[in-house]
Image (tube, grey):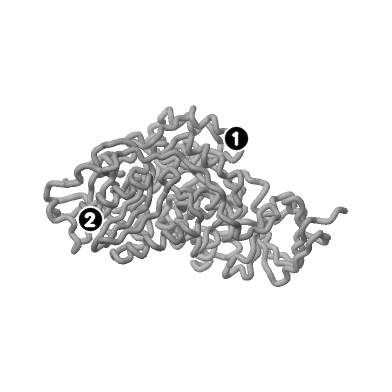
Amino acid sequence: MKPADLVLDDAFLYNVFTGSWDTGTLAIKNGTILGIGDYEGKKTRDCSGLYIVPGLIDAHVHIESSLLTPPEYARLVALHGTTTVIADPHEIANVAGAEGIEYMRAARQNAAIDIQYMLPSCVPSTPADVGGAVLEAADLHRFMGKEGILGLGEMMNVPGILAADRAISEKLALSSIRDGHAPGLSGKNLNAYILAGLQSDHECTTFAEAEEKLKKGMYIYIREGSAEQNIEALIPLVTAATVSRCCFATDDCHADLLMDEGHIDRCIRKAIACGLDPGLAIRMATLSPADRFGLADRGALAPGRRADLCIIDDPEKFGIREVFVKGAAVTAASPAPQSAFPPTIRCSPSGPGTIRITGHGMARVIGLVPGQIVTESLTYDCNADDIPDLDRDILKVVVCSRYRDLPAGVGLVHGFGFRNGAIACSISHDTHNIVAVGTSDDAIRNAIREVIGAQGAMVAILGPDSSVLPLDCAGLMSTLPYEDVVRRLSDLSEVTGRMGGIRNPFMYLSFLALTVIPSLRITNRGVFDSAMFRDVSLFI
């Protein structure tokens, strides 16, 4: 018998099929697991006292939200044990359409991990949202069957599903693997959504919501991102009986959180801290997503599976010691080569026109919810001349189109807590118009102009001080190495920290225009109420 390429000797090996830790020797050849047993290898590693688990899988992520290009994202998360991600490139698709999808697909070729994509199903996210592209079923069909394409990404147009919209039905017919997106949906409407063919949800924020969806047959992706933190509320849902239908998802994580705290390994640690059995947490991060997406070649330490695996010291603490992708050890490699993307900021360099508001009386105010991307629909007695109202933490929020010169949408927001200055960015899910919030019109306009001048950026302005992270790839991602992006994010955090207020303000800002998430939103048209699913006036 020919020797294996690598033998990992005398380790504790996690069996995801039985939930047991088995002592044994793991053999790898040509990037594939030969099996567990008495093997000889060209190289042998003594792993006595160490634990080996399958490589970790993220069931739902938007790579663009990391602010990194796919190769740099892969280089970073690989160090944290992630070997596969299921990504939905609908951020760049909303900006650049099919060209954006093709860019992301091409960028997976030399990545340190395996990146699989779900095709964006809602570009734009709603018919009223005007972004950089419109993708119909015919536009998506060209990608079906291509390498790296698994299925149809999150279907956010719940009203369209319930109305049996023909264009949506054509998209659903493209693939038998379909991800859902249905925050707060329940009862007969949820039944109808599932009946249409949607299979998963990553938007649950309460145990009751997740339990109902699970009982009706949906896969539940328990999410823990920079602004969406749902593990604590949802992890009691996971038992030995339900774990096959439960996965982890990070959805939206900035690069600094990934570098400092981890990726799916961070989710595992938090789930264990919340009382979940380590074995079930590992199963959620490995076999469960592999089975959900039909990836029968990974997710387990078994013969014939990809040799994607992590070596750890202690399952309870789940610190990553070493990672292998297709049998090769992951190292802190040099920055990946980057490819350019055509400019996508086309509005006037002078920035928005007037952002003045008029009126007085009861006003609709967007209320931030710490740790969530949902918002509250608040009302305050306001006079436009008294905004900003720092005592009540009511600030002006502005959205202007990146694609053409249009009037800016202006609203009010509570929860940022800024005492001075402004922030702006070209990340504004899902149309990715330019969004800004601040304590004066001048500061807001200056921040927006900085974003436009950089052809996409995150900008913080506080008096004479400013900090900028250029997002030169489609106005969404930076072509800088992840180490430099993290340093720039630290600079931004230092400036926003001196403004006072909420942690991770850019992540909250980036979701304020997302009209498919409850409850009150702001677009380039003005205030939007997702419950009524229409534009509404600022003053009632």
Q: Can residue 446 be seen in this view?
A: yes
Along the polypeptide, which appears first: circle 1 or circle 2? 1
**Residue at point 58%, 67% (across, down):** 319
Rendered location of residue 77, percent (x, y): 55, 56
Identify the image quadrant of residue 318.
bottom right
Q: Is residue 217 visible?
A: no
Q: Is residue 392 left or right of residue 244?
A: left
Picture quarter containing residue 334?
A: bottom right
Q: Is residue 212 above or below residue 405?
A: below
Secondary structure state at the residue bearing disc 1:
loop
Which labelled disc corresponds to residue 395?
Answer: 2
Residue 3: x and y in percent read 84, 56
Q: Distance between the residues labelled 1 and 2?
A: 47 Å
Q: Which amino acid does label 2 sit on?
A: Leu
Residue 277, how many percent across, how many down? Answer: 57, 65
Res. 160 image quadrant:
top left
Q: Are marks 1 and 2 in contact (CB under 8 Å)?
A: no
Q: Residue at image x 50%, y 59%? A: 483
- The residue sitting at the right extreme is 1
Residue 146: mark in rendering: 1
Query: Where residue 528 appears, x then y in whole percent?
Result: 27, 43
